[in-house]
Image (tube, rainbow, N blue to C red):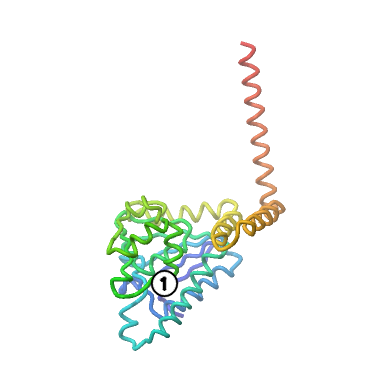
């Protein structure tokens, strides 16, 4: 089995770790196939309720391994084929019902932005950097960047990043909405674990369906989204988990309302 991406599934949590630190976790052809296969495995596993996406070494992901592409004798057709393989993995993760948190350190470049943006919640180290660099070497965006980047930060800012030789600091990425939180590097792994644990400790399936509705909704009509929302909330309402949580919420609300009414009545008598 390849070790370019590590996978560990335990207690409902799937941890997916980019593991080519000597190459800044740039994705070569083999790693791309591994990514697709892991996406299929994780999203098809009913025991998985949450995913952590992280990376070994000083960088999160430098995108595609352009050096390997340039020295391997690969043709444009080969590169297109490899992109389709990686894209399948991205699509599989993005359109699934598995909530994903990314723990990001160091550099995120080129296609690494698209891989990072498969996550729904991104915790970045305060030392992280974010850059495009596609056009600098005569290439165009891939790995979902042309879609996922403007969805995250807006078209104008996405174009500013793609059309200029600009590097965003972690603070700028937070301000732009590219990442969700910024923390000292040493605190990032624990915070990602905390977020995944929160999903797993609560209504895990409901969090998964919420992220699916948002992700899938971008490619459908408003009417289709409304129909899916109606069907999804009805299906969740019939589950034992939801029935117990709704009943507890209703009981707590009734108790709070009774307490407020009693306090109001007592105040009116004084």
- Quarter of the image that includes the C terminus: top right
> Seen from this angle, which residue lies furthest bottom?
73
User: How many numbered discs?
Assistant: 1
Residue 221 horizontal side relative to residue 182, left or right: right
Residue 242 location in percent, x, y? 67, 50
Which residue is the extreme one toward the top?
270
Please state which of residues 76 and 6 is positioned toward the viewer in this rendering.
76
Q: Residue at x 51, y 74 (%)?
A: 88
Q: Residue at x 33, y 71 (%)?
A: 134
Q: Is residue 166 left or right of residue 80?
A: left
Residue 147 versus residue 125 in the image, above or below? below
Q: Position of residue 196 (x, y in %)?
A: 49, 56
Q: Residues within 10 Å of mark 1 (few under 14, many from 20)?
A: many
Q: Which residue is mark 1?
A: 142
Query: In terms of depth relative to the viewer, which is nearer, 183 or 117?
Result: 117
From the viewer's side, name the closer residue of 48 and 164.
164
The relative height of residue 244 versus residue 63 in the rendered view (above or below) is: above
Residue 57 position, x and y percent, is 32, 67
Q: Residue at x 62, y 25 (%)?
A: 260
Residue 235 x, y percent position in the rendering: 70, 56
Furthest residue to the right? Answer: 238
| Vertical side of 59 occupied by 82: above or below | below
Query: Is 18 in front, or is 116?
Result: 116
Q: In terms of secondary structure, where does tag 1 sit?
A: loop
């Amino acid at each position: 089995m390849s070790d370019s991406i590590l996978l560990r599934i335990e207690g409902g949590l799937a941890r997916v770790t980019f593991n080519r630190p000597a190459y800044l976790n740039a994705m070569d052809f083999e790693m791309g196939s591994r990514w697709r296969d892991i996406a299929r495995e994780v999203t098809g596993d009913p025991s998985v309720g949450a995913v952590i996406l992280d990376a070994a070494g000083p960088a999160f992901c430098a995108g595609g391994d352009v050096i390997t592409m340039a020295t391997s004798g690969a043709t444009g057709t080969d590169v297109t084929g490899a992109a389709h393989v990686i894209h399948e993995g991205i699509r599989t993760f993005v359109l699934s019902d598995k909530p994903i948190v990314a723990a990001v350190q160091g550099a995120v470049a080129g296609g690494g932005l698209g891989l990072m943006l498969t996550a729904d919640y991104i915790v970045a180290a305060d030392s992280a950097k974010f850059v495009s660099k596609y056009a600098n070497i005569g290439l165009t965006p891939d790995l979902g960047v042309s879609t996922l980047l403007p969805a995250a930060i807006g078209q104008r800012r996405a174009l500013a990043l793609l059309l200029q030789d600009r590097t965003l600091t972690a603070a700028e990425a937070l301000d732009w909405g590219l990442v969700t939180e910024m923390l000292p590097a040493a605190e990032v792994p624990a915070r990602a674990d905390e977020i995944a644990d929160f999903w797993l400790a609560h209504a895990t399936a409901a969090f998964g369906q919420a992220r699916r509705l948002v992700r899938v909704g971008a490619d459908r009509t408003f009417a289709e989204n409304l129909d899916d929302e109606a069907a999804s909330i009805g299906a969740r309402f019939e589950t034992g988990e939801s029935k117990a949580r709704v009943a507890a919420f209703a009981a707590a609300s009734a108790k709070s309302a009774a307490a407020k009414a009693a306090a109001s009545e007592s105040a009116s008598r004084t």
